[in-house]
Image (cartoon, rainbow, N blue to C red):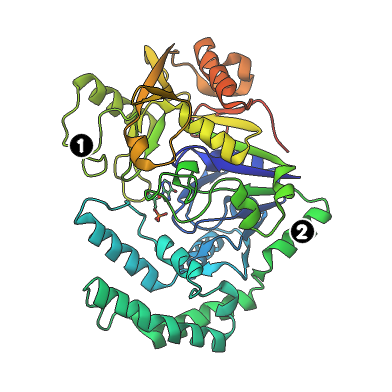
Amino acid sequence: MTVTIVGSQLGDEGKGGIVDVYGDAADVVVRYQGGDNAGHTVVRDGEEYKLSLVPSGAVRGKTNVLGNGCVVNPATLFDELDALRERGLDPDVRVARRAHVILPYHRVLDGIEEDAKSETDSEVGTTGRGIGPTYEDKAGRRGVRAGELADPEILRDRLEYVVPQKRALAEDVFGVDVGETEAFDLEALYEEYSDYGRRLREEGMLVDAGAFLADRIDDGETVMFEGAQGTVLDIDHGNYPYVTSSNPTAGGAAVGSGVGPATVGDGEVVGVVKAYLSRVGSGPMPTELAGVEGDTPGYDGDAADHEEELADHIREAGGEYGTVTGRPRRVGWLDVPMLRHAARTSGFTGLAVNHVDTLAGLEEVKVAHAYDLDGETLETIPATTERWADCEPVFRSFDGWQDVDWTAVAETGYDAVPDNARAYLEYLAEEVGAPIYAVGVGPDREETVIVENPF
Ligand code: IMP
């Protein structure tokens, strides 16, 4: 039995909380894409753990796998593992031999390319973790896989081929002098990364992910696939080029872990939805309220007062500030065409809708039910980002719901959710074609109304 958790929007939907609530029943937690660009906070026994690479199951004593579809920064991996051990935990994390390794030059090049793009205001707003450049090298067949770190001769061969190319890319293409920088120093890289390889091998962390998972599933164990980022950040199904470089959608769970698609498809796929929309970085956002200077394309700080107030209110109430940078996130109304697209690409069997409490107290709650594009009504996102940017939301309005004791609501169950909020949720379920499995009504673990547990 497998359960796959997928972000339906632009990341930051609160997947961590849902993984946490459902994860208790999982024996194995697998990440299948992305790397240390995925900040998540896990709270256990009142203790808060901030992780960006290690799956959240590590805090709960599960077996965790970083699948072949991930890009692994070993420095982050061992920092996070050491920090967990210092706090008395004994994390069990396996790394796919086929996963690609983020090297220091990937991070430097991520920054260099963003700087170059910023000259024409076309930067993506990446997390700067080297994600894109690492997947580029994977596709370009010049990457380094985790399994190769443990084989010093192969590692040296790979680095001898690739490091001079990376230096030339920085210096000759982008005109950035990287001089003696360690990130481009072959010997320094070899020393540091063969050490990581030794550690991965000695700690028995390297696995053939597909075979490892197949054995566990054959033994009757339950597996949770933990998607990072979200559907509209998917390299194929997202708003290219304002995307990450992997596949957060459910198909990625099969390719990125080495199990067959039927293994994922026979299980449940839960789409996580934030009850409104938030976005980090650039790109279109038809339902955006006001804007954030520097991130919202073309925004110069000039918005209608009531929109500014509403955006500030939602941002404050929902804590919509970047976990790492503290940057304000862009916020807007829920975008239903986006959710129809997400449900289709991943085949959602259920929805978990978070932040329903954040909208409490508003007189009116709006959603984009459809788009108007040059007089035509669209029910889903157009395939090109430029056309998406031209879409005008066709809004539907819902009566707001009152602020209540949400912990009590979570204890009592779905029937205690205010009527107007339930009308909103049921409309969503109907439009998206998947039932409500959970409703997030606060940041704590206890503040989730569980309607259905997919395990
Ligand atoms: P990258 O994944 O660092 O290459 O960033 C590419 C895009 O994905 C940027 O717009 C980032 O803001 C966005 N992104 C990456 N990871 C996350 C996340 O965990 N939450 C929200 N946005 C993300």
Front: mark 2 or 1:
1
Corner quadrant of residue 91:
bottom right
Three-letter amino acid code of the residue under disc 2: Ala
Report which residue position mark 2 lands on.
214
Q: Position of residue 346 (x, y in %)?
A: 60, 40
Tell me: residue 426, above or below residue 134: above
* 213 shown above or below 232: below
176 lies above or below 155: above
Residue furthest right as drawn: 219
* Residue drawn at x 33%, y 40% as measured from the top left: 386
Identify the residue shown where x is 37% and y is 73%. 105
Local packing at callout 2 (Cα closer than 10 Å; few below 14, some 14-19, many 20+) is some
Relative vertical location of residue 211 with respect to residue 5 in this rendering, above or below? below
Give percent across and percent down for residue 115: 24, 60
Q: Earlier in the sequence, mark 2 or mark 1?
A: 2
Q: Is residue 262 left or right of residue 375?
A: right
Give percent across and percent down for residue 82.
52, 65
Say what secondary structure mark 2 lies in. helix
Q: Residue furthest front?
A: 375
> Pointer 1: residues within 10 angstroms few (<14), some, or many (20+)?
few
Q: Is residue 320 visible?
A: no
Q: Nearer the viewer, residue 377 or 410?
A: 377
**394 with respect to 405 (left or right):** left
Q: Quadrant of residue 335?
A: top left
Looking at the rendered image, the quarter that the N terminus falls into is top right
Say which amino acid is labelled 1: Tyr
The residue tagged 1 is: 299
Q: Are marks 2 and 1 in contact (CB under 8 Å)?
A: no
Is 307 in front, or is 449? 307
Residue depicted at x 24% and y 82% = 179
Q: Quadrant of residue 316?
A: top left
Q: Is residue 36 left or right of residue 301?
A: right
